[in-house]
Each structure stands twice: as C-alpha cells, then as structure tokens.
Amino acid sequence: MVNQEIIARFANFADFTDEEIKAMAMLANEEYYEPGHFIFYEGGEANKMYLLLQGQVEMMMNTDDMGAQRAVVMTVQPNEIFGWSALVEPYQLTASARCATRVHVIAITASGLRALMVVSCALGFRLMQRACQASSARLSATRLQLLSTVRPVPA
C-alpha cells in the first residue's frame, strides 16, 4: 500500500473521491528501476498500471517480427500514467517501457483495479475515459513518429 496522497496528486485522479483513491492506494506499491531497464515488453500480460513519480520512461514499439528492433514512439514524463492496457481486454501490452533515467513509479495491481471498476461503475467510467484519452494521445504520437520516417520521393 502507498500513501493515498501520492495518487491524489495525479491530475488524472482529480475528480476521484477520497475513498476511491484510498482503494487504489491499497492495491499499489512503489517500484524503482535503473536506466536501460525494461519495465515491461510489448505483447506481454498487462498486470499493472503505472504512475510515474520520477524519471523518464520511453514507450517503444517493435519494428520487426521478432521484437529485436524497437522505436521510441513517446517518452512518459513525471505525473503521467502508463500501462493503460491493464484496463482493456485482452490485457496485453501494446508497447515496451524502457527507463531512460532512474525511475520511481507507483504500480497498481491490474486485477484489483479491474475488480474496483466492477464494484464502482463511476470509478470504472472515469478510468476508462482516462485510458481512452491516453490511447488517443499515444496514437497521435505514434502517427507523428511514423510520418517523420517517411520521406517524400523526389519528382
């Protein structure tokens, strides 16, 4: 369990009740990672959602069939959330997360979080809204990354 005030500081949870934040805090633990460490890999099971307290995390997508080559599509900054795939079936990670710097996160257990969403439809709705917003932003970032690799063919 983590101090619920840490979770309450995240803008994504500004409209959550104290009880909802407390329930999420009971499912959470602090984790630390060193630069270069992969927190998770694309295609793996999404069993945690992460709140970034300190550091930078590069979200990377595989650029080959084997996952041996990856491209950074965006960098997560402090006070942002990543690992939203933990809320959406099939609960499979859509990117890899590599630490660009030393990282301090709050990791919230996905199965517990999904159980809270069933018990509280309001909490579940707000979490899914945030997940959709994050997915939309990441899709835009990925699109921009892709477009930056395409060069016009000279006429």
Image: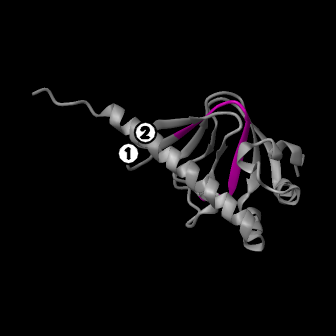
* Quadrant assignment for the C terminus: top left
Nearer to us in this view, 7 or 112: 7
Classify 124 as above or below 11.
Answer: below
Report the amino acid beneath label 2. Answer: Gln
Report the amino acid beneath label 1. Answer: Asp
Nearer to us in this view, 63 or 85: 85
Q: Residue at x 82, y 49 (%)?
A: 29
Q: Is residue 57 left or right of residue 106?
A: left
Residue, far left? 155
Residue, far front? 15
Q: Position of residue 43 (x, y in %)?
A: 52, 55
Q: Residue at x 87, y 57 (%)?
A: 26
Where disc 1 sits, the SS reads loop
Q: Position of residue 99 (x, y in %)?
A: 63, 34
Residue denoted by label 1: 64
Between the C-alphas of marks 1 and 2, the distance is 6 Å
Query: Is 54 colored magenta in this rendering?
Result: yes
Residue 69 shows which numbered tag?
2
What crowding class fits label 1: few (fewer than 14 Cα within 10 Å), some (14-19), or many (20 or more)?
few
Q: Residue at x 57, y 67 (%)?
A: 89
Q: Residue at x 38, y 50 (%)?
A: 65
Instruction: Of the two numbered discs 1 and 2 on the same chain, state the one appearing first in sequence.
Output: 1
Q: Is residue 124 left or right of residue 70?
A: right
The stretch of residues the image draws in magenta is 45-59
